[in-house]
Image: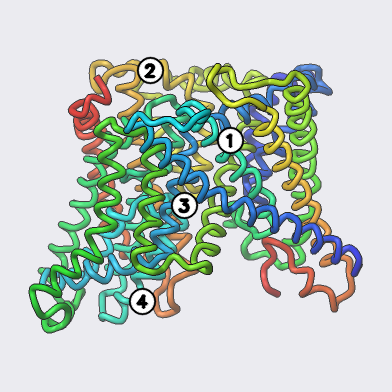
Amino acid sequence: MTKLLAASRAIERIVEKIALAGGTLFFVLTVVIVFDVVTRKFGYQLAGFGSTRLQELEWHLHAAIFSFWLGFAYVKNAHVRIDVVTSHLRPRVHAWLELAGCVVFALPYCLVAFYFTADFAWVSFVFGEASESASGLPWRFIPKGVIAAGLALLLLAVVSVALRVVVYLFGPAHLRSASAFAGAKAE
Amino acid sequence: MTAWLAQHLAILMFVALGVGLFCGFPVGFVLGGIGIVFGGIGILLDVFQPIQFLNYPARVFGAVAANPVLVAIPMFIFMGMVLERSGVAHELLHCLQVLTRRIPGGLAMSVTLMGTIMAATTGIVGASVIMLTLIALPAMIERGYNKELAVGTIASAGTLGILIPPSIMLVVMGDLLQVSVGTLFAAAFVPGFVLSALYLGYIGAVSFRWPMLAPPLPADSGPKTRGQYLGMIATGIFPPTFLIALVLGSIFGGWATPTEAAGVGAFGALLLALARRRLTRQMMRETVLQAGLTNAMVFLLFFGATLFAYVFRALGGDEVVRGLMVSAGLDSAWEIFIFVQVLVFALGFFFDWIEICLIVLPVFAPLLQGLDFSSHAGAGVMFLTWFIITLSVNLQTSFLTPPFGFALFCMRGTMPPQVTMAHLYRGIVPFVLLQVVGLILCISFPGIALWLPRVTGLLD
């Protein structure tokens, strides 16, 4: 049980590190947009970085921002839940519901979505797909791969939370507070 | 049995969704999970092919990632978080409060004005209501404000933010129904200010008639000299107001797309924070954390809802919806209009706007896009613009309606113990009535919504 908990924590740390590193992209995206707007106004063009490329870069960054945070948001319990009905239930019932949700909804979704998205990115890589616009960015597999990576991180986060719930439900009493999972209410 | 099951899978998806959502598991996972489960059942019953899942990544990529319109969402969220974390929001409330100290109900009016100006700060009802409660409620109680008036003002001001542009909700609705976001921002402008004016008028009238409900600040508080007075406006009120005006102005003037305006707005907010010497490492870390989590919350819903909607459609959901509407006798334009409005109003008791939009709008979009209201509000984009604005005002009303209203529910956890739900229920009633007035005005006179987009040439 201690090992499960340690594994859960290790996964969490990976997910967190990547999300926080991805957070700097908020600043990058802001700067890219401002740069695009200003240079277009004055008709200036950075060599090799015309407005089409910049605008594609904008949504590439956007894709990276949400992808890198999907999993971390689950670890941090930031995803919306409808808890009108369940808010008065006992913590153990909560834990069972969370485990059921992970097994029935989250794990199958993450597995299937990751499998097909990774395939989608791989095909793009093999065919050397580039932007459909002649003046656009090459390497379309990068944003596609980033989304697949985001789903992999989401899968890791679900595994991490599920492990915590398992320790909480079946582990010894002294690990209970240490295994409080995302969405758990204080006992 | 299997034939019956195969025919009714699309309906059963909604039944399963209803059950799944109320189990308290994250909504995005429930949507995606039900998509997978029903896709799987469909494969077993031979009405869905495994290969159809291949369309899912293409849809997520095309509609969610490679979609320049949606890039506005992280930027507006980021801009709002920077304004909040740098203390600009707090300072704005303080300044407004001092400036309105001689007006009856000044503090309550300040809260409404702040909800109007800082509408962009979050755009998610839950978050904006909680933020306003934390900032304004203690100040109002300390001042000796009537509790009903205080909580009613805060709940209504917090939900105003979803309608008044720049609004993330309008970005999502515009994307789903294929109406330009700039047009929607322009269309929401007048209705938003009409509602804001109704609130302000009500607060003023009540505080004037019963001054003990809203005790004013002592007259000697606030700036003494003219210089201090102007300084306060220059540092506290002018910067955020100017920033929002710049963002909206550049969209209405046709100089920038909403996404570009959002990026420039976020940049402006960072400059404001820098000017206030609040752009510290710590502040940036907190801002990025909050913005990243909120943004991810929004986009997991997009991920889940895209799969749900795709499987639903592949299982023949569109025909099922049309069939149900016809068999219920709902086929004229007005009947469908009213049905969707009532449905959304009911859903607003439990869900924030984003779940409602992502679940309901894709289902009804084909039906809605075909409606002809040319005798009342026009057809095509004209109708959809008016429809989205009425839907937004309707949602706002729903969020405030006791006993379930989503905004009220969100406030519950943040209110100090001396304020109870009973205060909230009593206090919100006049505001709900004002909302209903606003909704009736918007439905009866489409010009309220359509005037500004026409004048600015965004709609013709």
Percent position of residue B370, x then y: 41, 15
**Marks 1 and 4, Cα distance to the nearest angstrom?**
43 Å
Q: Around disc 1, counting alpha carbons within 10 Å, would you say few (fewer than 14), some (14 to 19), or many (20 or more)?
A: many
- The relative height of residue A80 versus residue B263 in the rendered view (above or below) is below
Discs 1, 3: same chain? no
Q: Quadrant of residue A6?
A: bottom right
Secondary element under disc 1, as helix, strand or loop, is helix
Residue A4: image location, x then y, percent: 89, 63
Residue hosting label 1: A60
Q: Earlier in the sequence, mark 3 or mark 4?
A: 3
Mark 3–mark 4 Cα distance, whole angstroms, equals 26 Å
- Residue type highlighted by circle 4: Pro
Which sits earlier in the primary sequence, circle 4 or circle 2?
4
**Of circles 3 and 4, which is in front?**
3
User: Which residue is at the far left?
Assistant: B226
What residue appears at the point 53 percent right and 42 percent down from the top-left corner?
Answer: B355
- Judge whether residue B1 can be spotted in this image: no
Q: Assign the C terminus of chain B to one quadrant of the image.
A: top left
Residue in the foreground of this view, choosing between A93 and A141:
A141
* Residue at position x 70%, y 25% in the image: B9
- Asked if B88 appears above or below B32 in the picture, the reply is below
Report the side of B329 relative to B149 (left or right).
right
Find disc 4 in the rendering and name its residue.
Answer: B138
**Image position, residue A96 (x, y; %):** 78, 58
Instruction: Name the residue carrying label 2.
Output: B371
Q: Which mark is residue B78?
A: 3
Gap in Å between the C-alphas at discs 1 and 3? 17 Å
